[in-house]
Image: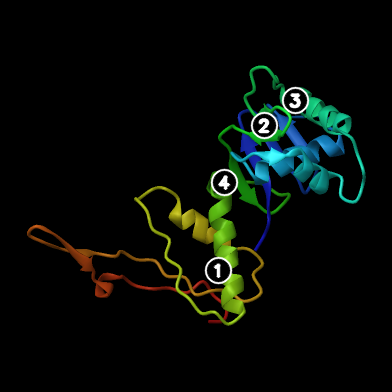
Amino acid sequence: MREINRWHFGPIDLDASERRLLRDGQVVPVAGKALGVLVALLRRAGQLVTKDELFRTVWPGVVVTDAALSRAVHELRVALDDRAATPRYVQTVHGVGFRFIAPFAMAPGAGGATHAGQWLIGREADLARLQDALAAAHAGHRQLVFITGEAGIGKTAVVQTFVEGPIRRRPVVGAGTLHRAVRPGGSAPADPRGFGAIGTAGGSR
């Protein structure tokens, strides 16, 4: 599937494939290493990314000092109009690493216009799980994957983004409603016969 390469948070739009960062619709110059740090943090948003992990990701195969990372983070904060003391986006965990802390939206692919329906809010981990499940299926481990949740939380958007990627062999995807039989004193196990009509996502089964 297509890797997530486009993010939106606050007034910031980032297209990592095009190496372009916009703030309030205006291009903001940002050094390549600073941009690499931002992408690495966004891919692990909400999680602590250690300095060693950033060194391996942003400076692969190169021996660098903490000063290089500090300079890249400083350049990144200038581009984002962020502050180390009162961060909105990049939080410092002193002596350990950094964490991206802001809400964000993301979209797969690169270039071209993006309509509102393309953006997914904080669902990169879900897409990664689907990709892992598909890889396991291709390896011969057949399985069913259910995406469940309350109405309106973005289940369909996640599935559409997944199946629209350049997948070598497309999965069969179904959509429907799973009903529960309710009895006095509690509910019985879900009745598989209540699972509604199924459609395919195109391609081979």
Q: Which amino acid does label 3 sit on?
A: Arg
Image position, residue 104 (x, y; %): 58, 37
The residues tagged by marks 2 and 3 sit, at their Cα atoms, a distance apart of 12 Å
The residue where tag 4 is placed is: 119
Q: What residue type is labelled 1?
A: Ala
The residue where tag 2 is placed is: 12
Image position, residue 195 (x, y; %): 30, 70
> Up-down: is 64 above or below 199?
above
Q: Which amino acid does label 4 sit on?
A: Trp
User: For mark 3, does the 10 Å Cα neighbourhood hold few (<14), some (14 to 19), or many (20 or more) residues?
Assistant: many
The residues tagged by marks 2 and 1 sit, at their Cα atoms, a distance apart of 32 Å
Which label belongs to residue 77? 3
User: For mark 1, does the 10 Å Cα neighbourhood hold few (<14), some (14 to 19), or many (20 or more) residues?
Assistant: some
Of the image marks 1 and 3, the number of the one nearer the N terminus: 3
Quick one: which residue is furthest to the top in this view? 85
The residues tagged by marks 4 and 1 sit, at their Cα atoms, a distance apart of 22 Å
Q: What element carries label 1?
A: helix
Which residue is depicted at the point 51% across and 71% down? 201
Image position, residue 45 (x, y; %): 62, 41
User: For mark 2, does the 10 Å Cα neighbourhood hold few (<14), some (14 to 19), or many (20 or more) residues?
Assistant: some
Is label 2 in contact with label 3 (beta carbons under 8 Å)?
Answer: no
Of the image marks 2 and 4, the number of the one nearer the N terminus: 2
User: For mark 4, does the 10 Å Cα neighbourhood hold few (<14), some (14 to 19), or many (20 or more) residues?
Assistant: many
Of the image marks 2 and 1, the number of the one nearer the N terminus: 2
Q: What element carries label 2?
A: strand
Q: Nearer the viewer, mark 4 or mark 1?
A: 1
The residue where tag 1 is placed is: 133
